[in-house]
Image (tube, coloured by chain):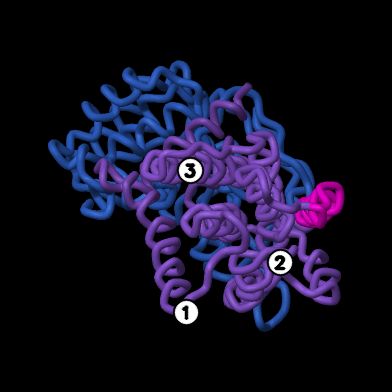
Chain colours: A purple, B blue
Amino acid sequence: MGQINVINALVLRETRTRFGHHQLGYAWALAEPALMILTFLGMFAVAGRQPASDMDSFGYMATGILPYLLFSKTTVQVSQAINGNKGLLFYPQVKPLDVVFARIALEFSTYVVVFLLLMGANVMLRHEVSVSDPLLIAVGFALASLLGAGLGLIFMGLGQLSNVTERARGPLMRPFFWVSGLFFTVDSLSPRFQEMVVYNPVIHPVELVRAGWFSTYDDTYTNIPYALQCALWMILIGLALEVVTRRRIEVT
Amino acid sequence: MIELRHITKAYQTPFGPNVVLNDINVALPTGESIGILGKNGAGKSTLLRIIGGAEMPDLGKVYTDGQVSWPIGFSGGFSGALTGEDNCRFVARIYGQNVDRVTDETRAFADIGRYFYMPIRTYSSGMKARLAFGMSMAIDFSVYLVDEVTAVGDANFKKKCQEAFSDRSERSSIIMVSHSPDTIRQYCSRCAVLNRGGLELFPSVDEAYERYAAYQAGDVI
């Protein structure tokens, strides 16, 4: 039960540190993804591209960018869980994995709220409700979170072995932005590319969230067991690395 | 009783591993306050962090009964972006204590005025020490690990710390690391010497100091 206290205290603390004391801090959590969505909407408009079939542009962009951001932010937050919080480890109650749990929980709840607010606003502006299957959306967000947690744990463990990890993480993560279906649907690709792109586990949560929102979305290519297996293997490897590198942590 | 069994810790350096603690096996009685003398770089602070559970030894295990504090007198553990009050609430929560009581007692002890409600990054190192010390007094530990707390703060604050410790000498004891035998004499009745990775416990501060002085003079290795 002590650990529940610790994780709860960490979530409250991280919320304070991240969003500050001002109400505006919470607005920033919303503004950052909203700005990103609007930027790419603008670029799409300039390029004259339209999302396939009867999806609205904003909904199409948001359903891609939000699960992707949940994945990538969770990865970054988890990978920095030890190095960004060394002072905390002075308190013996606080174990690195507590910080990891707290950060996963905070990212997940932040992006669920952001999704509800943005899509809620979108629904109200467009006067149409088109949620096809909320369960698929929930599964998509959970998968994005688990994949981010797994990759983050691996980076966190490697970060204890070599400080090159932190610098390499950005470039290593960047391709995910382009191949995770933010700017295309798997359905719209040629069969050859479809085959390749579904090996990227991050594309599955994106497709799931889209399929959960748009009733006409073709999600025949999503493979939940595959993405889940990828996530669980990464988590397992990450946890093993954590155990191996545990004694190397130096608290200063 | 705090029991150290086979405690070993080495740090990697470009010149090979530096073994700071080498298979330490000691039982430290917690009924009385104990000082640990050691030269700079002897591994005193590392030992304290390991006893407090903040860092893991490469080998071995520490067995403790009762609640042991974090190493007091350190500057870590605070988030610079948060206020003293927020940091205080956090620590109260992880120790499962009443948040309001701990906050009130800490504010009273630290006596840093409005700074209590300002971000830690605006604090001087003395203010940080006062806050950390106040927090550790608000949570009732049975053993306080002290890392030269007396080195920070002015004479008034030092006196306050000493009084706080003597007030609770009935229920709590101190393990203090220092390179100054005079500081240790003020607080502790027994003393150990940390030298070349080994820890040796002596029945009195004087005997420990004799050995410590011999190590420093290079008479004994």
Q: Is residue B212 visible?
A: no
Residue identified by numbered label 2: A158
Q: Quadrant of residue A153?
A: bottom right
**Is residue B42 found left or right of A192 in the rendered image?**
left
Horizontal arrangement in the rendering, residue B138 relative to residue B32 (left or right): left
Q: Earlier in the sequence, mark 3 or mark 2?
A: 3
Q: Which residues are magenta?
A: A220-239
Which residue occupies the foreground of this view, A102 or A182? A182
Frontmost of labels 3 and 1 is: 1
Which mark is in front, 2 or 1? 1
Q: Is residue A230 magenta?
A: yes
Residue B197 x, y percent position in the rendering? 68, 59
Badge 3 vs badge 2, beta-carbon distance below 8 Å: no
Residue at image position (47%, 72%) is A44
Q: Residue A245 at what x, y percent from top left?
A: 74, 59
Chief secondary structure of the magenta portion: helix
On residue A47, the disc is 1
| B102 horizontally vs A136: left or right | left
- Name the amino acid type tagged 1: Ala
**Which label sits on residue B120?**
none
Question: Badge 3 is on which residue?
Answer: A110
Of all chains, the one bearing label 3 is A
Number of disc labels: 3
